[in-house]
Image (cartoon, rainbow, N blue to C red):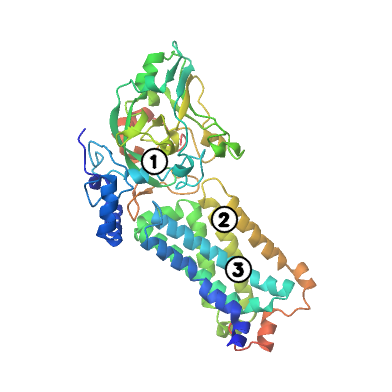
Amino acid sequence: MDKIHPSEITPEPLYLSRRQFIAAAGTVAAGIALSACGLASPTTSPTITTNLKASKDMDELGDPLTAYDTITHYNNFYEFSFDKEDVAERAQNFKTSPWTVQVGGLVNKPRTFGLEDLLKFEQEERIYRLRCVEGWSMVIPWIGFPLSKLLAQVEPRSSAKYVRFETLLDRQQMPMQRTSYFQWPYAEGLRLDEAMHPLTILATGLYGKPLPPQDGAPIRLVVPWKYGFKSCKSIVKIDLVEEMPVSFWMASAPDEYGFYANVNPDVSHPRWSQATERRIGELSRRKTLMFNGYAEQVASLYAGMDLRKFF
Amino acid sequence: MVNRLRTHWLRLIVHIGVWLPLIWILWDALHNRLGAEPIREIILRTGKTALVLLILSLACTPANSWLGFREALRVRRALGLYAFMYATVHLLIFVGVDYAFDWSLLYDAIFERPYALVGFAAFLVLLPIAMTSTQGWMKRLGQTWTRLHRGVYVAALLVIVHFVWSVKLDVREPLTYGAIVVALLILRLPPLRRKTSRRPSIPSILRRHHSNDAI
């Protein structure tokens, strides 16, 4: 992967405002700060992490990557905080080592994987759009591996129809789990064919770095054609099951969140339209694409299904 | 000067205070502190300010009739109009910036699902109330004016529904505002009002003491 200039991966408004900020701070102060950080470029904010890597600066549709700083400071991770801009701080001391993922259920070879085992799967970059059910979106260069490779190792039995994912339950480290407002731990599910789809990955990093806690460290699911909440974070358990699992959001608000949660501009959330979204970094909204722009690859999974009914 | 301050302190606080949320937004915007979704943040903040000011204006009459805080009546209209101002900014940014006046997208956003529609309905209820807030209209409309302006409770309840529907799941905050609106509404219901009838209501106060004073 080529190392790319950080200014190429920062949305222009943010990048420009940083430039203004630095100009305003005065060249002397900026010079001291930058030399202290060992950064060569005077247009890079000293707070932006170095060593960010992405093979391209855009997705396959030509839309620029969302800045690392934004991806890591705008997170829905209710275990830490309900405030998206507060999660990074609340999660900073989250312990992700040692970490194990127990894979079992209807499989021939159940196994507990250590994080080091999971990192032995060939890690590749996937630049995916992430569309939140709340109506915002990002473009993220994930690092990870196809879930199908992991599932192949445990050999699902023919009776397995669904895959259930579970997030860590740790009331010490994840303070919001002490509230009884929700049913913890967070759980999600996929149909087996969705889980085996080549686009579905387990992510271990982004921008060439290990996942920070707020983005679901050390390992999380990424299903780019579904709303973000399907992409379960900080996974400790993966079970192959026969019955459709009940996800966290299905349990919390069954009228509003279905099992499938495919990105679909024509099927509104019961209270708001899903026809548009705001790409973080842009001012006005843009139209939401069917299956988040992955229709060509995944539409066949749902052939003949009424997507209004199976929302 | 000191005397004037003593008489007008509440009006001074209101007329200066109402601009602070707007100044705060502009300050944060200039310093890039509105977060990852600045437009959404501005919409949320202007909306919430509108609701708070609306609630304060609804609290003025009970403050007088229950607590004898007559000074409150002098800022009631101003608070209501400022609430309407923030509601207008809230709506204009939604239509003009968030949706960039794209009417087909807006049609979908407003009519496809109820939360934006309810907010818009609240605005339509407030519009004639704001337009007839002057004393000229008050005299011209007579009893109709009173009836029309009771619509402000309808608007407040619609705003609460709009707020509750707009949040993803945790409705504690909008329901707190809702409880306040309902409490203020109950304080004005006829059986309770009769108990305080010895204290003058606003129109009579206006006529007797402050006939050329803005409330």
Q: What is the chain identity of the residue bearing mark 3? A: B
Q: Is residue B144 above or below residue B97?
A: below
Residue nearest the viewer, comparing A169 with A254: A169
Q: Does any portion of residue A303 appear in the rendered image?
A: no
Give the residue at mark 1.
Answer: A264
Which-is-in-front pick, marks 3 and 1? 3
In the rendered image, the residue lying farthest to the left is A2
Q: Residues within 10 Å of mark 3 (few under 14, many from 20)?
A: many
**Secondary element at image label 1:** loop
Label number found at residue A256: none
At horizontal 74% and vertical 71% (from top left) the residue drawn is B66
Q: Residues within 10 Å of mark 2 (few under 14, many from 20)?
A: some
Give the residue at mark 2.
Answer: B161
Residue B187 at x, y percent in the picture:
72, 66
Q: How many marks?
A: 3
Which-is-in-front pick, marks 1 and 2? 2
**Secondary element at image label 2:** helix
Label number found at residue B56: 3
Q: What is the chain identity of the residue bearing mark 1? A: A
Q: Is residue A208 left or right of residue B51?
A: left
Q: CA distance from mark 3 to mark 2?
A: 18 Å
Q: Is residue A2 left or right of residue A189?
A: left
Question: Image quarter for residue B140?
Answer: bottom right
